[in-house]
Amino acid sequence: MSTQHRGPLSGVTVVDLSRILAGPYCTFLMAEMGARVIKVEPPKGGDDARAYGPFVNGKSAYFASVNRGKESIALDLKNDADRAIFERLLAKADVVVENFRPGTMEKLGFGWDTLHKKFPKLIYASASGFGHTGPNSKDPAYDMVMQGMGGIMSITGNEGQPPSRVGMSIGDMGAGLYTAVAVNAALLHREKTGESTKVDIAMFDCQLALLENAIMRYTVEGEIPGPLGARHPTITPFQAFKTKDGSMIIAAGNDSLFVKTCDALGLAGLTNSPDYKTNALRLKHHRELEHAIESVLKGNTTAHWIELLGKAGVPCGPINNVAQAISHPQVAARNMLVEVPDGSGGTLKLAGNPLKMSAFADPKARRAAPDLDADRAAILRYVGG
């Protein structure tokens, strides 16, 4: 039975050859938007992520978090009978997604050129380390490698400290997001023109694209950006500040907000200082300004200052840990923690879908991630064999 539910991608069938995180996150988003996602996994062990902890009743919660709502069939793509089933699947699919090293699909006889001739309406999406062109195309890649090579680690952490990884797998997640965006664009292009296309997403490219203003600052100013801790590189005051009982964020993104911040903190005199008249001047004298603001903030608690600054209209907030973040009332109000069956009568609480659309429901529960080969019979009926 299909796990498809109503959404903007209802009626779209995705054959998902991807594993671990980048590709599965793309197809997870498509499943959340209503697509039918059929995971094609190797018979021995399936997706590598099935072996990643933590485990609940012997099943990987890591796997469940990005594979809920999908279906699974185990196929050996070097076996003739399984290859035939796979081709019947492709004949009925709208999209195939893979995140193998470039050349792997060609060796199997399922590269873009071959599939495009056989299935001219099929969109082919690949998420790999370096993409299908360039001198590093065939190199292996993992999230940490991409974070290092792509420059993101060089601007993460505190100055003078050892290299620091971004606290989540931004290499994989970034590639998954960009792949999903491109696949949806490819579906729209096919709808308008009848033409299918190959989507070629490189984790390395995505890391560069996610550098936001760092590349621009280097190409314009000629200085190589470095880590700034919790301080914005071009806006001041826009950072973490110490309080009496911890730290908090103040994000005064323009001159008006700077004045409101100073007034609320009893530092109105700072707004008349020639050192702080403009953002450029505040940036130049950020150390002195930080000291002046923290000298006041250290006199009371984070909660006190958040209430005071919030009333003044200043963007600010606490630095929550994960437990605090998911207990925030916004989480329940926005349905950002959903329940998924764990396969033994209990439930997992997993991150919800941030893609809210007025035309479609956002249920509080989701279908479980599939066991390996769990949907074989239904899928075989679907492809007629």
Image: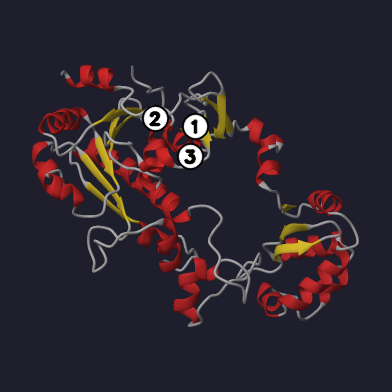
Of residues 306 and 65, the one drawn nearer to the viewer in this rendering: 65
| Residue 361 relative to residue 158: left or right | left
Amino acid at the residue labelled 2: Pro
The residues tagged by marks 2 and 3 sit, at their Cα atoms, a distance apart of 26 Å
In the displayed structure, 90 sits above or below 224; it is: above
Question: Dot 2 corresponds to which residue?
Answer: 8
Amino acid at the residue labelled 3: Tyr
Colouring rule applied to residues: secondary structure
Circle nearer the N terminus (2, 1): 2
Q: Which of the two discs, 2 and 3, sits closer to the camera? A: 3
Secondary structure under badge 3? helix
Question: Dot 3 corresponds to which residue?
Answer: 62
Q: Position of residue 226 (x, y in %)?
A: 55, 74
Give the residue displayed 72% in from the left and 58% down from the top.
Answer: 249
Q: Are marks 2 and 1 in contact (CB under 8 Å)?
A: yes
Circle nearer the N terminus (2, 3): 2
Of residues 131 and 196, the one drawn nearer to the viewer in this rendering: 131
Circle number at residue 357: 1
Residue 213 visible at all: no
Of residues 384 and 74, the one drawn nearer to the viewer in this rendering: 74
Give the residue displayed 53% in from the left and 61% down from the top.
Answer: 165
Q: Which of the two discs, 3 and 1, sits closer to the camera? A: 3
Give residue 352's quadrant in the image.
top right
The residues tagged by marks 2 and 1 sit, at their Cα atoms, a distance apart of 9 Å
| Residue 102 relative to residue 208: left or right | left
